[in-house]
Amino acid sequence: MINRELIRIKIVQLTYAYYQNSNKNMDNAEKELLFSLSKAYDLYNYLLALIVAITNEERHRIEIITQQAEREGTEVPSQKFILNKFAVQLEENKMLTSFMETFKQRWEDDIEAVRKLCNQVEQTEAYQEYMVSDDSSYEADRELWRKLYKQLIQDNSDLDALLEEKSLYWNDDKEIVDTFVLKTIKRFEPDNGDQQELLPEYKDVEDRDFAQRLFRAAILNADQYQRYMSENSRNWDFSRLAYMDVVIMQIAIAEMLTFSNIPVSVTINEYVDLAKLYSTSRSGGYINGMLDTIARGLISSGKLLKVMPEPRVKRDAPVEDKKPVEQKDETEIKEENNENINNEENKV
């Protein structure tokens, strides 16, 4: 579950924090990195457990209403939602059950938040259509929870605030972890029963190794990497750069030089995105140009054994030869960029 996007984010955060801390201890900093990554996996499991908690609260409500209806001789409420096949399978899941047995947090301790979510569930169009639908398939049950998660849990400021109170590490994790919860919901199959596999903490040993090696390289070779930045700062006073920009470029250079199987373009794109997220509005463009220049310099000097496409040379065609350029909308451009990045990642 912990992928390289999340690892890069954590390393940027913790490298910045490392330099703000007067007691710079590499071993302690590395332990902090691994601990913060493990907290992201805790959040993944805890958000899955929220689906179970909502189902249990609805079950409790139905039991009370059913008892009242039986006493009064009125219509008994439908049990369709509390018997949702996906939710029941998740509740019985061996991996989730094992996690929650040892995890100290409990949704029962925040029952008011769970009840509020139950009220919101009952008001959604997805829930109301589901309750009157004749479709009782597993696929319909699973799809309901995918919709409910996206509508009520993925973008919920009250829930985000509650989770942040429980762990400061979760503040920046939820957006990425939400995507993994949704991926897990889609992967569930009825034939797997309680043995359905959840996402592992790390996809493989290489990703954990990636985190440790990148963090150490960024810290231990900081002087050398910052010298590369200073030499290529293009008429900028290096000492006046935003410090977060320096940290981001430092880690990007470490990745370029440490991992021979990651294309330069992938590294640059990843850290430009992080600059847009964590630094100034102008940082993305500046860092893109700086990293491109630094990478080409390292390649030409033989310090970086990778290849990069030749830089594009802008030439104005004669007026009579110019043709109208097909305009592409933002979605088309984004899809092309994502496809290019995916193709390069697949080579890794």
Image (cartoon, rainbow, N blue to C red):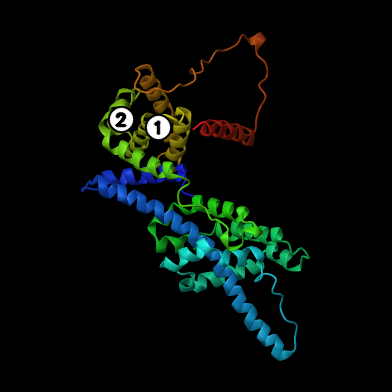
Is 61 placed left or right of 279 in the picture?
Answer: right
Q: Which mark is residue 159?
A: none
Identified by mark 1, the residue type is Phe
Is 203 placed left or right of 140 in the picture?
Answer: left
Mark 2 surroundings: few (<14), some (14-19) or many (≥20) residues within 10 A: many
Q: Residue lying farthest bottom?
A: 71
Estimate the x, y position of residue 186 in percent, counting from the top left: 62, 53
Residue 272, quarter of the rendered image: top left
Residue 215, quarter of the rendered image: top left
Residue position for label 2 = 225
Estimate the x, y position of residue 22 in percent, counting from the top left: 21, 47
Tell me, yes or no, whether the two marked residues, 1 and 2, touch with CB atoms within 8 Å.
Answer: no
Q: Work out whether residue 31 or residue 108 is closer to the camera in this orientation and state it.
A: 31
Q: Residue at x 41, y 63 (%)?
A: 165
Q: Residue at x 76, y 63 (%)?
A: 135
Q: Residue lying farthest left?
A: 23
Whether residue 77 is visible:
yes
Residue 291, quarter of the rendered image: top left
Estimate the x, y position of residue 179 in percent, counting from the top left: 55, 50
Residue position for label 1 = 259
- Give the vertical position of 235 relative to 272 (above or below): above
SS state under label 2: helix
- Give the vertical position of 16 relative to 88 (above or below): above
Estimate the x, y position of residue 338 in percent, counting from the top left: 57, 35
Mark 1 surroundings: few (<14), some (14-19) or many (≥20) residues within 10 A: some
Which mark is in front, 1 or 2?
A: 1
User: Disc 1 or 2, which lies upstream in sequence?
Assistant: 2
Distance Cα–Cα, label 1 vs label 2? 15 Å
